[in-house]
Amino acid sequence: CHQGKGNTPQAQEAARRLSHKLHELKEKINQAVVNRVVEDFIDIVTPLKLFTDAVVAPEGTPNRDQNFSDKANNLQNFSNRAAKTAKMVAAGGSGGNKKLAEALQSTATQVDSLTPQLISAGSIRLTYPQSKAAEEHFENLKQQYSNLLVRTRNLCDEATDSGDFIKSSEEQMRKHTFLCEEAIKNKQPQKMVDNTSAIARLANRVLLVAKQESDNSEDPNFIDEINNATDYVQNTLPQMVHDAKAVAMSPTDHAAISKWRESNKALLNAVSQVRKAVQPELPPLPDLSNLNVEPTPQSTYFIDKVGEPIRNTPTPNIDGVDNLRPMSPQQGGRVSPLPKWARGIFATILRINTKNTNLQYNHTRILREEYFCSYKN
C-alpha cells in the first residue's frame, strides 16, 4: 500500500488468501471451544460425588485425610476448567448474545468463588463429623454447587451450535470406542467400563441438546425427525451398556465382544441420525465450469410497433430554423400585448367596458365621501 500497489492483482490475491486464512482460523477456534464444552461437561456429577464420599468417610478409614486432599484437588481442577470454558464460550461463542454472555460470565465467577467455600465446608465436616451445623452447611453448599454446574452446562450448550456439538460428541464417542477396543485387546476390564461410561454420557448429552432443539422449534416436521432420531438413540443405548458389562465381566468372550461391537455401532449410527436431523447436510454446489450462458436476443418490440429507432432517423435540416423565431418589433411594427381574439372590434368593447367601470368607481367614491361628511356634521 505504501508503494501504491494496493489495487494490483498481486495485492488483491494476497488479501483474498489472508481472508481465507482468517476464516479457517475462526473455524478452528470455534471447533476448539466446542470440543472443550463437550469434554469438560461430559460428567459434572462424578467429581462432586467422589469429593462427597471423601468428606463423609468414617473416622479411622485408611488414608482418610490424603483421600480428602486428593478429591478436593480434583474438584478444584474440575471447577477451574469448567469456569474457564464458560468464559471462553462467553468471549467468543455466544454469537453476539450479550445477555447470554453476561450470564456465562456470572456463572463462571460464581463457580470460582463457590468451590473454595465448598472445600472448606467439607474440611470442617471431615474434622467434626458429629456436628449438625457443619453437616448442614456442607450439604447446603454442595446443593448450590451442583445447581450452579448444571446452569453453567446448560448455558454453554445454549451458546454452542447444536450441529457442531453433536458432531464433536460423535467424534468423542468414536475415540472412546477405539479405547474400548484397546481395553479388550489388553484385557483391561476397568478401562472398558470407564470408556463405555464416557460413551453413554456423551449419548445422553446428545439427547439433551437434541431435546433443546426440539423444544425451541415450531416446525412439526423438524420436531418429528428429531424425536424419531432420539428415540432410536434411547433404544440402542441401554443395549450397548448391557453388552459392555458382559465384555467387562468376560474380556475373552468373543461372542460378547461381537455383540457389543454391533450394539455400539448401532448407537453411533443413531447419534449420526440425530446430527443429520438437527443439521441437515446441504447439497453440493453445482459445477459452474460447464455452465454456458447464451446472450439474450435483443428485443424488437419497440421497432415492430413504432418503426425504426430514433437514432436511425436522419437529422432534420436546420436551414429554416431562423424562420421559427418570433418576429421582433422592428420587423413588423408594434406588437399588441392582447391575445389575437381580443384585438380589433373586441379591443374597442374592452376599452368601453373599462371606461364605464372607472365612471362607476368614481361615482361610488363621491357618494361615500358625502356620507362621511354628513355623519360628522
Image (spheres, helix red, strand yellow):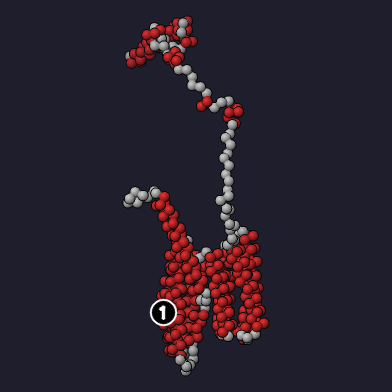
Q: Position of residue 122 (x, y in %)?
A: 44, 84
| Viewer-proximal residue among 257 and 54 | 257
The answer to whether 275 is drawn above or below residue 367 in the figure is: below
Residue 178, visible in the rendered structure: yes
Instruction: Pinpoint residue 60: horizontal percent, then vertical percent.
Output: 47, 94
Q: Residue at x 41, y 11 (%)?
A: 327
Q: Would you say 71 lies left or right of 251 here?
A: left
Instruction: Residue 367 in the image: state x and y as whole percent.
Output: 39, 11
Q: Is residue 98 above or below residue 180?
A: above
Foreground: 80 or 124?
80
Q: Is residue 8 above or below residue 228?
A: above
Q: Where is residue 330, by image quadrant?
A: top left
**Residue displayed at 55% across by 83% down:** 191
Residue at position x 47%, y 10% in the image = 340
Determine the residue located farthest toward the bottom in the rendered image.
60
Number of numbered discs visible in the structure rendering: 1
**Residue 173 location, quadrant:** bottom right
Q: Nearer the viewer, residue 188 or 44?
A: 188
Residue matched to label 1: 116
Q: Nearer the viewer, residue 161 or 56?
A: 161
| Type of amino acid at the residue the image marks with label 1 | Pro
Under circle 1, the secondary element is helix
Q: Residue at x 62, y 83 (%)?
A: 247
